[in-house]
Image (tube, helix red, strand yellow):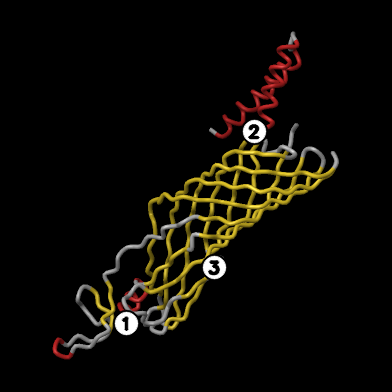
Amino acid sequence: MKKLTILLIALFLIGLSFNLLFAQTEKEVEQAKSWLGQWKRNFASPTVGVTLFRANLDGRYLMNVPDSEVDFPLTAAEIRIFKGVNVSKRGGFYTGVETGLFFMQNVNELTFPESNLGEMRLNYQAGLVFLMAKFGLRMDIGIALFGVSLGGEIGIGGTMFSGGFDFSTTSTSGDEEITEGYGNAAANMGVIADASVEGAIRLGKNFRLVAKAGVVAAPIDSERRDSDFYYQYTYIPSTSIKPGWYWNGVGPLTGDDEKRAILNNYQVEIDPFAIDLRVGFVLNFS
């Protein structure tokens, strides 16, 4: 399918070139130039970068046993493609549609001290696909061969998020790993808003290097399942209920069962606001 699309585009451009070459009247030439001009103005500008979210790790039990709440950075690599009207224009307003992907994965293993486990590890992998309507303004200063520009843009749209988090620790025997995880197997819909400033260097009329910095607001629902494990922290001698972890009324749990219960009661919440840094280019064919 991809090869067929490329072939059709190539045939279209070849046909348009022949149409310009063998046009019999001035009207036919102007019509062909009009089609070509529209294709030039509607151009896709790609950017790549990184988005820095802030996440919070916390226990879900009634009393914080132990004191587990901690913030940590959650990074996402991103790629975007912006297609619109006057995107490559030297200055002025431009508008269009931008689509892209945030891919979230910890490069290094995250570890946290846990008084009952000694150490707990966290790994995550998720993806956020988005589609936004964008509006921007660019001001260009310079001569035909070289120039610089400043601008800004805003956008709003929708998202689809899917991914999960895994908590792990070593078993009681120390020769195997216990892992508990949760996440969104199906994609959850959400909203996204974006605001950024742009600085660029223009080389001639045909090429512009851009750098963008801004803020992204994307509420992410890191949904998790309800746990069957709970912590009974009050000792009641008459009922022989002892402090500890329980599962469906059975407990207190010990060994690997206790560790599994502790891991199962942790969760991650992602702050909706993130810092966004990107670089890319714009081509100007006109």
Q: Residue 245: which quarter of the image?
A: bottom left
**In percent of the image, x 59 and y 50: which residue is there?**
79
The residue indicated by pointer 3 is: 73
Give the residue type at disc 2: Asn
Give the residue type at disc 1: Gly
The residue indicated by pointer 2 is: 42
Q: How many residues crowd around disc 3 within 10 Å: few (fewer than 14), some, or many (20 or more)? A: few
267 shown above or below 135: below
Which residue appears farthest toward the left when viewing the image? 238
Q: Nearer the viewer, mark 3 or mark 1?
A: 3
In the image, 68 versus 23, the foreground residue is 68
**In percent of the image, x 32 and y 75: which residue is there?**
61
In the image, 140 versus 271, the foreground residue is 140
In the image, 160 versus 108, the foreground residue is 160
Q: CA distance from mark 3 to mark 2?
A: 37 Å
Q: Nearer the viewer, mark 1 or mark 2?
A: 2
